[in-house]
Structures are given as C-alpha cells and as structure tokens.
C-alpha cells in the first residue's frame, strides 16, 4: 500500500475541511456524461472519477493537440519521443499506454497495427467539442483495453443553422495550420463537415546532429443526423486522417537516436452508423450500431519501406434500455471482428503474415437509486473470444450526496487487456519474435473519492484515492536463447497505487485559478520476485492554471504551468552491454495563450509554449521542443 507523506495528507485533509465547513446551498452535480455507463448519466450518478474538457477549455488553451490538454488532467502522464508529430504515449494511473481505451464519438480507435495504442500525435483539437475522461477499469462497459480508463472524444455537435467557420495560424519551426468547417441543417436533418491541415518543419530530435524532423497531418470528417419521425433517429459519421512524420532511428554504435532519413506514414478511416427507436410514451429504447476502423502504418527508411502493418475492425451491436422507476436496465450484445496484417522484407525470416480474431460480448447493467441521494450501478460483461478463454468482467459503483454541495463516490471493477497481435505474432528479424501462447492481462481496480463545492460554489474540488492490482502483465522485453526479444506473462502482481487532487476556484467574472496533483506508485515484479518501479511513470505530476479576462470577456488570457516529475526509462547500449535503467529529470512547462474577440465573427490569438525554454526529455535520448510562439485567427459566419 502506498504511503502518504505528512504534507500530502495535510493537503487532503485541508481540502476536505474547507469543502465541508464552507458548503452552502448547492449546485447539483448534473452535468451529463455519455461514456461512464451504457446510457448517458449525470455526474451525480457516477461512482468513478470524471473529468470533462469542454469547448471553452479548448478555446482558452488554443492547444493544437489533444495530448497537450491531457497533461493537466489528474492521473494522466504524457511521453513524447521528440517534437510535434513524434510518437506520443498517454498513461493513466500508471497503466501501459495500450491499457487506455480511446473513443471518438463512441467508436473504438485504438490501433491493432500499433500494439493497440492510440496515435495521440495525430489527434488535433480542431472540430472537437468535448473530451470526457472516466478513470478506473471500464472493461465491463467497453471490453479490452479499458484498464486504466476511457477517453471519449466528442466532435462538434450538429446545428440546424447554416454556418461556416475556420482558422489559420503560423509560428515557430515553420509551422502553418489551417482548417475550415461547415454546419447546416433544417427541420429533421443536420450536417457538418470539416477539414484541417497542420504542417511543421519541426526541430532536431536527437541529442547530436542538426536535422529537423517535421510532420504533416490532414484530418477530414463529415457527419449527419436524421430524425425520421415516430421516435426513430439516425446518426452517421466518417473521419479520415493522413499523417507523415520524420523520426530518427537508433545509432547502434551509441544506442541513442541519430539523424536518419526515416519517415512514418499513417492513414486511418473510421465510420459509424447508429439507429435509435423509442415509441411515443414508451419506457423502452432500442439502439443499433455499426462501427468501422481501418488503419495502416508504414515505415520508410532511405526512401524504401522497411515494414508496415494494417488492421481493420468491424463492430455490430444492439442495445435494449428500459426505465424501471427511478432506475433502469440495459441489455446489450456486440460482435467484433478484427483483421491484422504485417508486411516487410524477408531477411533472416519472413515477417509477412495475416491474422484475425473475433469476440462476441453480452452486457447487462442495472442503475438504481434511493431517494435523490444514493445511486448505484451494477454491470457485468461476458466475452466469448475466438483466441482466448471466455472472460467475465464486473463493476459496482455508487454515489452518495452527503449534502447539496458534497458527494461521496466509490467504484470496484475488473479489467482485461488482450495480448496484441504484435506481442503474439510480431516478427522483426534479429530483434523480436512473438509469443502466441500469451494470456490476457487481468486487473482489479478500486477507487474512492469525494467531490464538492464551497465558497458559494466558486470553489469546485475533487479528491480520489485509487488502487489497482494487475495479474499476468505482459513483458515485451524478455530475451530468448537466440538473443532475440519476445513477450511473456510475468509472475506475480503489478501494483498501482495513488491519489489525485483537483480544484477550480473562480473568484469573479475576470479571474480564476485551477490546480491538479497526482501521486502514482506503479511497480511490477522482477525475475527475482522483487517489486521495481515501472518505466516512464513519473511519481509526481501537477498543473496550475490562471485565467484572467478583461473587456467584459472579449479579451481572455490563460497561463498554464505543468510539472513532470522524475521517471525511469530503459537504455540499450551497444551490444554486448546489458540494458540499463536510467532516470530522466523533472521539468516545468510554462504556456501562455491570449485571445481577443474583434467582433462576434472574428477572434485573434497568440500562444507561447515552453516559455522557460526547458531542455527536457520524456523518453530517454529524444529531445523535445524548446520555446515557440504562434499567432492565428478564427472566424465564424452565418450563411
């Protein structure tokens, strides 16, 4: 069990005392979340820790990448291998990067071709309305990958008005970004479409050399809703990304990144179709879904492909919801089929292969309540997998309103992460060979917390303590007798313990401040049965933000300071030296954004990042961006 230091304990106690003593007649916790249960629920009914990043938060930060927003979220840590467009990993509560499920408008977008990790480096904030984050194991709702939590990206809502909007910006490192979107609708239909292009010359990633590593990203999307009448509605969407980013390969004479002509190319296409039917005056709702994911990843070295992966996933689902008094029951069935392929040169072994996997799932969820104060959710999921043993996951969560301004919450749930196609079948000559006998990782997660308001609702705060035990964690760096690397399930339990604090204080219409702090103790067993720290998990992370508005809200300013604590990483020196555990130092990132509304249709802004010009790394050997500045404008007009 993790130990709380005296200052840390005092902080928790202080926040709790303030929230309890200063509570006043209150604001309800009534914001709706769509990803914490099988139906949309108010925050007051949810037992897990929830964070919501809305369009106002995105506008204040003017960040171009969603991963940059996540640095300030409790429980989250971000690791980027260099500059904009470089591989970016997000971990939640000490989880692996592929143990965090990412949804875009409810569509699973973790890529089987990249070991089930989501490509965060290619997720622009353009066309995004809201980000919902539910921490803790959610496999009961969403199946594999949802061990650390779920991030649901919700794109811009439909509109019955006709309007066009867009933006353009330019700045340091030869960066030019621009986008345009259109929304239209009338009566029973609505349509939205948009395209966004980001381009940067980048900077040097490796410690030595002077080659700039640039990136380009194009995102296009279209969605349409139709109300057919008599309680029947249809929602559809299509999203496409095309990205290219330069990176530096490893110099085997030093074991460190070095300038090279290496490019990663990625394309993804996602689509969804949903139909909902609820008869007039009926307590029963029927929902049918079709979701599609298609992705490809190619690595080009010196102008020639050195290997590629591709995957596609089709998910069909049906859900039955019925209102039962103050609660409700959901029964659902899903079938998912995934195909994976790997291509590469046949050198010292053939990496070319095609694999597939199917899973059929059955889900039940009951939502109950007692008066207006106590609510709970009980859910279970049964998975019948073509490649693994049948599995069951369950979750119980509860929320209790201790007063109008304070609620207690708790959640207990199991999670599952299936081995990736790469871990099971991947083959990289001379370096990695897959293990088809791997078992799924299994976890038990517990979190308890308190949310509250104080100071006449000007202060909002959240405290969470969490614990997770993970069995059969997969170690992807186990050496074979032939000096190759393979993957194996580890003996013993990996343990993740920690606490999350968050507070937001709006003093008046002009000034506000918010802060978060996370403590994570993530360990795994070594070969001798000892617990060792997991890699790339900082024990301490924090963020502080200050908002200052003027001219009746036309001029808004946001200063954000983010702290990344020390973390361990693994360094592979030249053969035959053994790998080494190295420590990466802590750092502060300071960011300032300022925007001014010229009129109702035009806003201009400036943004500065890494203002302290910190020389820092998040992955050993890979340099990150120094101080940079950008200027841009956004417009919106009715047609």
Image: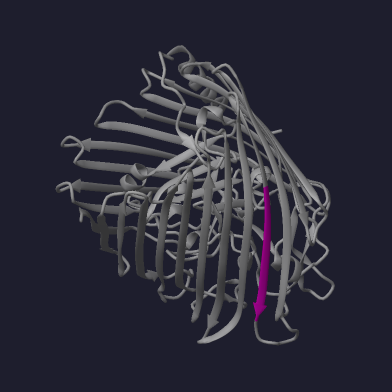
Residue 95 visible (yes or no): no
Q: Please determine whether, in this image, residue 296 is positioned above or below residue 450.
A: below
Which quadrant of the figure contains the C terminus? bottom left
The image shows residue 305 at horizontal and vertical percentages of 56, 84
Residue 353 image-quadrant placement? bottom right
Q: Who is closer to the viewer here, 145 or 525? A: 145
Q: Who is closer to the viewer here, 271 or 350? A: 271
Residue span colored magenta: 333-343
Residue under the point 57% across and 64% down: 293
Q: Please determine whether, in this image, residue 3 is positioned above or below residue 576.
A: above
Which quadrant of the figure contains the N terminus? top right
Q: Is residue 154 left or right of residue 368?
A: left
- Residue 58 among magenta residues: no
Most common secondary structure along the magenta stretch: strand
Residue 241 visible (yes or no): yes
Circle count: 0
Residue under the point 76% across and 67% down: 424
Q: Who is closer to the viewer here, 385 or 216? A: 385
- Residue 341 among magenta residues: yes
Q: Is residue 480 left or right of residue 595?
A: right
The image shows residue 401 at horizontal and vertical percentages of 54, 19
The image shows residue 195 at horizontal and vertical percentages of 35, 65
Q: Who is closer to the viewer here, 126 or 221? A: 221
Residue under the point 77% across and 57% down: 385
Which of the colour schemes (rainbow, by chain, secondary structure, one colour) is used?
Answer: one colour
The image shows residue 395 at horizontal and vertical percentages of 69, 36
């Amino acid at each position: 069990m993790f130990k709380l230091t005296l200052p840390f304990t005092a902080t928790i106690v202080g926040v709790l005392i303030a929230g309890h003593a200063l509570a006043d007649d209150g604001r309800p916790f009534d914001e709706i979340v769509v990803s914490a249960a099988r139906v949309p629920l108010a925050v007051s009914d949810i037992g897990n820790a929830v964070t919501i990043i809305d369009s106002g938060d995105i506008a204040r930060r003017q960040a171009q990448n969603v991963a940059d927003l996540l640095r300030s979220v409790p429980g989250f840590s971000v690791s980027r291998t260099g500059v904009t467009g470089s591989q970016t990993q997000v971990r939640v509560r000490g989880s692996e990067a592929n143990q965090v499920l990412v949804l875009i408008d409810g569509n699973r977008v973790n890529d089987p071709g990249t070991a089930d990790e989501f490509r965060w480096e290619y997720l622009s904030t353009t066309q995004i309305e809201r980000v919902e984050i539910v921490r803790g194991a959610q496999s009961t709702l969403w199946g594999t990958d949802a061990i650390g939590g779920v991030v649901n990206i919700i794109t811009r809502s439909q509109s019955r008005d006709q309007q066009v909007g867009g933006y353009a910006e330019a700045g340091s490192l030869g960066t030019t970004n621009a986008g345009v979107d259109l929304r239209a609708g009338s009566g029973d239909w609505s349509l939205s479409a948009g395209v966004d292009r980001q381009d940067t010359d980048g900077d040097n990633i490796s410690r030595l050399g002077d080659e700039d590593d640039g990136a380009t990203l194009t995102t296009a999307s279209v969605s349409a809703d139709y109300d057919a009448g008599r309680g029947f509605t249809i929602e559809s969407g299509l999203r496409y990304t095309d990205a290219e980013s330069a990176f530096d390969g490893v110099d085997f004479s030093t074991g460190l990144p070095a300038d090279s002509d290496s490019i990663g190319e990625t394309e993804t296409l996602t689509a969804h179709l949903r139909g909902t039917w609820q008869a007039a005056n009926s307590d029963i709702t029927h929902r049918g879904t079709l979701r599609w994911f298609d992705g490809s990843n190619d690595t080009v070295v010196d102008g020639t492909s050195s290997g590629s992966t591709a995957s596609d996933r089709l998910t069909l689902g049906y859900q039955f919801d019925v209102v039962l008094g103050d609660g409700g029951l959901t029964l659902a069935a899903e079938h998912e089929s995934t195909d994976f392929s790997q291509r590469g040169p046949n050198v010292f072994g053939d990496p070319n292969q095609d694999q597939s996997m199917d899973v059929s799932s059955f889900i039940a969820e009951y939502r109950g309540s007692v008066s207006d104060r106590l609510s709970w959710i009980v859910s279970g999921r049964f998975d019948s997998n073509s490649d693994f043993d049948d599995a069951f996951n369950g979750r119980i969560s509860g929320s209790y309103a201790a007063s109008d301004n304070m609620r207690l919450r708790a959640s207990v749930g199991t999670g599952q992460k299936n081995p990736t196609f790469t871990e099971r079948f991947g083959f990289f000559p001379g370096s990695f060979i897959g293990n088809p006998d791997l078992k799924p990782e299994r976890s038990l997660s517990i979190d308890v917390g308190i949310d509250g308001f104080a100071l006449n609702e000007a202060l909002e705060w959240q405290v969470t303590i969490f614990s997770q035990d993970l069995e059969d964690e997969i170690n992807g760096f186990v050496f074979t007798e032939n000096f190759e690397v393979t993957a194996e399930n580890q003996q013993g339990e990996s343990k993740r313990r920690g606490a999350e604090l968050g507070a937001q204080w709006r003093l008046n219409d002009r000034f506000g401040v918010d802060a978060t702090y996370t403590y994570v103790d993530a360990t795994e067993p070594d070969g001798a049965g000892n617990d060792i720290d997991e890699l790339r998990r900082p024990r301490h992370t924090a963020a502080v933000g200050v908002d200052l508005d003027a001219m009746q809200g036309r001029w808004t300013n946001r200063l954000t300071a983010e702290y990344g604590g020390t973390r361990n990483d693994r360094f592979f020196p030249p053969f035959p030296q053994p790998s080494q555990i190295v420590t990466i130092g802590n750092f502060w990132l300071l960011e300032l954004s300022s925007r001014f509304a010229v009129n109702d249709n035009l806003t201009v802004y400036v943004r500065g990042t890494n203002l302290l010009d910190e020389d820092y790394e998040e992955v050993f050997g890979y340099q990150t961006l120094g101080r940079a500045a950008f200027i841009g404008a956004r417009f919106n007009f009715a047609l």
